[in-house]
Image (cartoon, helix red, strand yellow):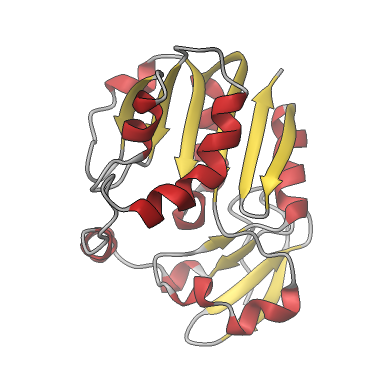
C-alpha cells in the first residue's frame, strides 16, 4: 500500500499493521493511518461525545498544564488566544482565562462558528488535536495564519519517541487517532513554517512565529 504523506506529500512506506494499516513518511517522519481506515465524520463525532474532559477534573488540568504552564510563562500578561479544537467540554480556555488571558474557542464539531478564525492571536493552543488531523498540512498552515509575528502555537499530542514501542502503544488503538508525530516531525514543522521550536516535555511543543 502506498499513499502520499498528508503533512508533506512525501513518499511513505508500510510501517505497521494491526487492525489498521500505518505508513511512515520518509521525509517528515509522520506515521499515519491509511485513509481507508478513517472513521466517518458522524462516527468520529460520536466518539468525541463520549469524552468526559472538563475543568472540574484535576487530573485533566494537570495533563493540560504540561503545555499551558510553560506556554503561559512565555506570554505577555493579558494576551489574546484561541483554543483550536476545543472539544465538547472546553477546558483550556477556562484555565487560560484563570491566568488572566483572553480566550476564544473553535471546534469544527462543537464550536463551529468560524468567526474566531478570521482574527489574529498572540497564541493558539492545539491540545489533543494533531493526532486527529486528516489533512494536517492544511491545518498547520491555517494555524500559522492565525498567529501575529512573535506569536506562539502550543501543541499537545502523543509523540512517538521509540518506533519499537509502536505496536504496544495504546495511542494508536483509538480509531480517531490517525497521525503520529516523531521529534523529527516537530522539527520539520518548525522548518517548514519558519518557526522556532521548544519542547518543554515529551508530548508538548511550543512553536514561535518569527
**Where in the figure is residue 157, as x and y percent of width and height?**
54, 53
The residue closer to the viewer here, 98 or 129, is: 98
Residue at x 72%, y 72% (from the top left corner): 13
Residue 210 visible, this orientation: yes
Q: Is residue 67 above or below residue 94?
A: below
Residue at x 29%, y 64% (from the top left corner): 40
Q: Is residue 116 above or below residue 45?
A: above
Quadrant of residue 112 in the image? top left
Quadrant including the C terminus = top right
The residue closer to the viewer here, 97 or 46, is: 97
Q: Most extreme residue toward the bottom, as rendered?
A: 18
Quadrant including the N terminus = bottom right
Q: Count every numbered label the image shows and give the total.
A: 0
Residue 140 visible, this orientation: no
**Where in the figure is residue 154, as x and y percent of width and height?**
56, 36
Q: Most extreme residue toward the front, as rendered?
A: 58
Q: Is residue 93 above or below residue 4?
A: above
The residue closer to the viewer here, 36 or 93, is: 93
Is 45 left, or right, of 128 in this rendering? left
**Where in the figure is residue 174, as x and y percent of width and height?**
42, 72
Amino acid at each position: 500500500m502506498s499513499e502520499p504523506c498528508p503533512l508533506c506529500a512525501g513518499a511513505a512506506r508500510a510501517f505497521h499493521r494491526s487492525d489498521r494499516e500505518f505508513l511512515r513518511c520518509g521525509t517528515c517522519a509522520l506515521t499515519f493511518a491509511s485513509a481507508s481506515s478513517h472513521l466517518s465524520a458522524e462516527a468520529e463525532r460520536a466518539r468525541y461525545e463520549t469524552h468526559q474532559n472538563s475543568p472540574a477534573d484535576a487530573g485533566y488540568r494537570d495533563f493540560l498544564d504540561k503545555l499551558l504552564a510553560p506556554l503561559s510563562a512565555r506570554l505577555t500578561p493579558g494576551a489574546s488566544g484561541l483554543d483550536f479544537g476545543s472539544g465538547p467540554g472546553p477546558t483550556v480556555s477556562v484555565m487560560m482565562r484563570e491566568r488572566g488571558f483572553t480566550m476564544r474557542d473553535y471546534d469544527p464539531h462543537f464550536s463551529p462558528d468560524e468567526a474566531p478564525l478570521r482574527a489574529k492571536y498572540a497564541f493558539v493552543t492545539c491540545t489533543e488535536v494533531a493526532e486527529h488531523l486528516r489533512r494536517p498540512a492544511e491545518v498547520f498552515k491555517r494555524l500559522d495564519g492565525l498567529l501575529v509575528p512573535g506569536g506562539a502555537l502550543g501543541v499537545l499530542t502523543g509523540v512517538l519517541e521509540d518506533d519499537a514501542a509502536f505496536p504496544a502503544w495504546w495511542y494508536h488503538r483509538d480509531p480517531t487517532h490517525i497521525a503520529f508525530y516523531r521529534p523529527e516531525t516537530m522539527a520539520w514543522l518548525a522548518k517548514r513554517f519558519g518557526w522556532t521550536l521548544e519542547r518543554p516535555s515529551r508530548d508538548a511543543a511550543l512553536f514561535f512565529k518569527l
